[in-house]
Image (tube, helix red, strand yellow):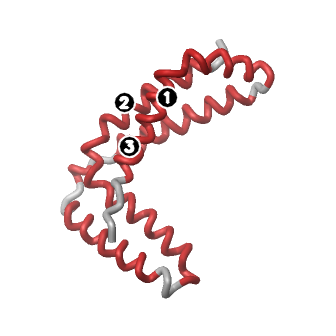
Amino acid sequence: MAETENLFQELNDVLQDFKTFLDTNVATIKPAIQAIASLIPQVTELIDKLVDLMNKLKAEIEKLDVNAIPGLEEATAFVDKVKGFLESAKNLLPDETSTIDDVLGVADVVGSLSGLDDVKTAILDCVDAIVVHLNSLKPA
């Protein structure tokens, strides 16, 4: 079974891409967003909700302290074994696909914890920069 990319690295990559897009395009987007907001005021609410979600994401990432988890390496190995079993069992238990997918989702997060320290600061920095950009798009 191929190794799944670390979810936190994937999150970092997506956030970095979004931040880079905003770094490059916010000056162009801002007048357009403000013009749209004058016609559709809910655009400001959309931006506020994005900022709120970014802040919630930041709070959750800040709470994660992988150094405080004893036996993380062994737990990650356990989760990898569980994921392998579940992927194999999907075809034999088609009525349980939803449950298996739920468990796999949790397993992906747990299995990715060991790589969090490598990207935690970068994720938090990206979130902060994106929030600044998003807030700058709102009408004055």
Q: Which label sits on residue 61?
A: 3
Of mark 1 and mark 3, the one earlier in the sequence is 1
* Relative height, residue 13 to residue 39 (above, below): below
Q: Secondary structure at mark 1?
A: helix
> What's the distance in space between the residues labelled 3 and 2, CA to CA?
11 Å
**Mark number displayed over residue 21:** 1
**Residue at 35% across / 61% down in the picture?**
4
The amino acid sitting under disc 1 is: Phe
> Of tags 2 and 1, which is closer to the observer?
1
Residue under label 2: 125
Q: Residue at x 37, y 79 (%)?
A: 85
Quadrant in which the N terminus appears: bottom left
Q: Residues within 10 Å of mark 1 (few under 14, many from 20)?
A: few
Left or right of residue 17, residue 1 in this image: left
Instruction: Report the amino acid beneath label 3.
Output: Ile
Outermost bottom residue: 92
Residue at left 50%, top 36%? 54
Depicted 136 relative to depicted 94: above or below:
above
The disc labelled 2 sits on which kind of residue? Asp
Callout 3: helix, strand or loop? helix
Please report whichever mark, 3 or 2, sits nearer to the chain's N-terminal start: 3
Q: How far apart, in angstroms, are the residues tagged by discs 2 and 1?
A: 15 Å
Q: Is residue 51 left or right of residue 86?
A: right
Q: Residue 79: which disc?
A: none
Element class at badge 2:
helix
- Height in image: 2 above or below 12? below
Q: Quadrant of residue 11?
A: top left
